[in-house]
Amino acid sequence: MAADPHVPHLPPASSDPPPGDGTAVTGAAPYGDAAHRLGLALVCAAAEPALSGVLLLDLDPRLVEPVARLFGAVLAGADEPARPPLVLGAADRDEDLWTRTRIRGGEHGITVVTEPGPLAEGDGADGAPPLVVVPDLARLSVAGMRAAVQLLGADLVTVERGGPRRTVRPRARWLAVCRGADAGRVSRHLLDRFALRLPMAGLRLPGPGAALAEPQAQQAGEALFVGLPAVWRSAARRGVRPVPVGDAAIARAQELLGPDAGVRRELALLRLARTLAALDGRPSASAEHSDAAARLIGVAVPESAPDRPEGHPEPPDPAPGPTGAPGTLPERRGAGADSRPRARDGGRGLLDTGPAEGIGTAPGAAPSPAVGNPYPEDEPAAVRDAVPLSGPRRRTTGPGSTRGTVIGTRRATDLRDIAHVRTVREAAVHQRARRTERFTVSPVDLHSNVRAAAPERVLVLLLDHTCRAGAGPWPEVLAPFLQWAYTSRAAVQVIEVGAADAADELRAGSFTARGVLDPRVPAALHRRAGRATPLAHGVELAAQALRRLFRRQGTGPAEAWLVVVTDGRGNVPLRVSHTGRPAGEVAATGVEDAVAAAARIGAMDRTRLHVAVVDPGREPYGDLPYVLADRLGAIVVDGGRGSGAEVAGG
């Protein structure tokens, strides 16, 4: 039967133990095979904690998931299922990585419990090491970059954030993907933390041309894992015994990397050579293993090694052009080199043209990094960030600093945002000592306002207390939203409808809190239900609050959530809430007014506003929350069970 051209060539599986007589097992297939190099590199990373960072350059984005499945299977082995990886991207923050906050509701209020986050919880657990996947290293958030710099290659890490203190030994393996053209924009400190770098532009997996679907991606990862030799899989699961590194291996690594290579690159190459020697069953790592490690990561190795042992004759000179011999790489040509054959006529070509230029390329443009180079950041191919590991600075001066709630005063340094009452009071104290006929204000009397910074995230809660009979415990239902507000340091605005102790039962009441830990917030979650339900007025107040927030030029929130807890049964028309006087029969006017007010929120900017409606599941008229959610453009959360929020539709 003919072999499938899309299935990568892998060495046959074997159940023999690691050889101890010097027979190499890592050279079962040529290093020119991308699948063989990838499998061997992942085995080395799983077996040696010092090689915990793997960076794949120019990998096809469709192959990120199959490769991640393969790495997870290598880490877990065949006896236990692979753990789901932690995927990091551009939106991760320090609060999401190092700590995890749990909010629990009870009779006495809200209890906040801080636990280790996803980067720290798996280090103290048993079983296979956790896997962290970065699909695009150039787009990783600053918090994720700093976490990688702190964890990769570290022996011990102490986490101290917001109460918990924990010292862990990092066990996680990192798999990152980056385009060679984008490597120049990534911090060198971050790139140096990845000990294994493999150019994977030529990797091919099952799936002819089209994007891999979920079943195909899973089958591709399983096929690669099954194709690995049993010796490799056993070594990856149990680890390898560290072997010493000889002086010849150190000298050879320095020669291969060049005099300008940093210490981290030399250590990474020697650690990889030591791991390959252990997989081969050798007592120590020699110059031969340094050459094998260089070939594995894509570093060009001269064919005539100076430290060749006696009894091994020199190989014959290769023929001109690329060769297919194992362990050799074709000669690298420059971006503008002409590879066409030329006829010899006195040393001159019959047709001598300049290098090919792409359409639209400007003269003097920076060349793209060479394909197959494991260190593309050494080539000046992109504009580099000055401080790539630092977050963006916040503006604390200018017109934006004169907005916000006044929380105090201080001595003024300019004439902007003067606190007039405090200034007049300071001047009045010194009038008798100054002996002036008129009231005099001296520069030392001037004070300015101190304002709280405008919140970047806001949570607006619209609570209909008259639907409490059918809903579960509100602290448990609203726990995901309260947890988001707590970890984001979001301001909270609570709008209450139908409370028994309301000042005016025909109108909705509201208050603003600095956070979810304000005592008024848990108190609002446990009020008794009243008779009237001015739902339309509550929706109108929510729309006005959101409109005020988004109209702040330069200081508006970056993200806001509107959470509405209601059964949709509004029995107070909007006109009655405005005038305060009941007017005849109500019928469905209150419901219609609430739906009309909700349409104004549905037309707002949805890039920053998210809306959710919690359905208590009351019958009859169980479709009213869905009608309201349709006008709001919201998702519907099932809140009738009381065992946590579940998205029901939207």
Image (spheres, rainbow, N blue to C red):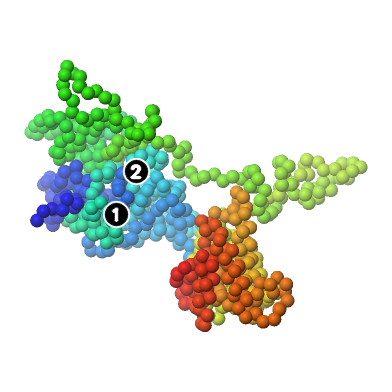
Real-space CA distance between mark 1 and mark 2, rounded to the nearest whole angstrom = 19 Å
Residue 533 shows in the view: no
Residue at the (33%, 60%) spot, across then down = 84
Q: Which mark is residue 512?
A: none
Is residue 598 depicted above or below 363 in this figure?
Answer: below
Q: Label 2 belongs to which residue?
A: 179
Name above or below for residue 385 compared with residue 69. Answer: above
- Looking at the image, the residue that sits furthest to the right is 437
Report whether residue 23 is seen: yes
**Where is residue 120 shown, x and y percent of the image?**
40, 57
Which element is circle 1 on? loop
Say left or right for 233 vs 359. Answer: left
Identify the amino acid type marked 1. Ala
Comparing labels 1 and 2, the label whose residue is closer to the camera? 1
- Looking at numbered disc 2 in the image, what kind of residue is underneath it? Arg
Q: Position of residue 372 (x, y in %)?
A: 27, 39
Indicate the position of residue 584 as horizontal and vertical percent values: 69, 81
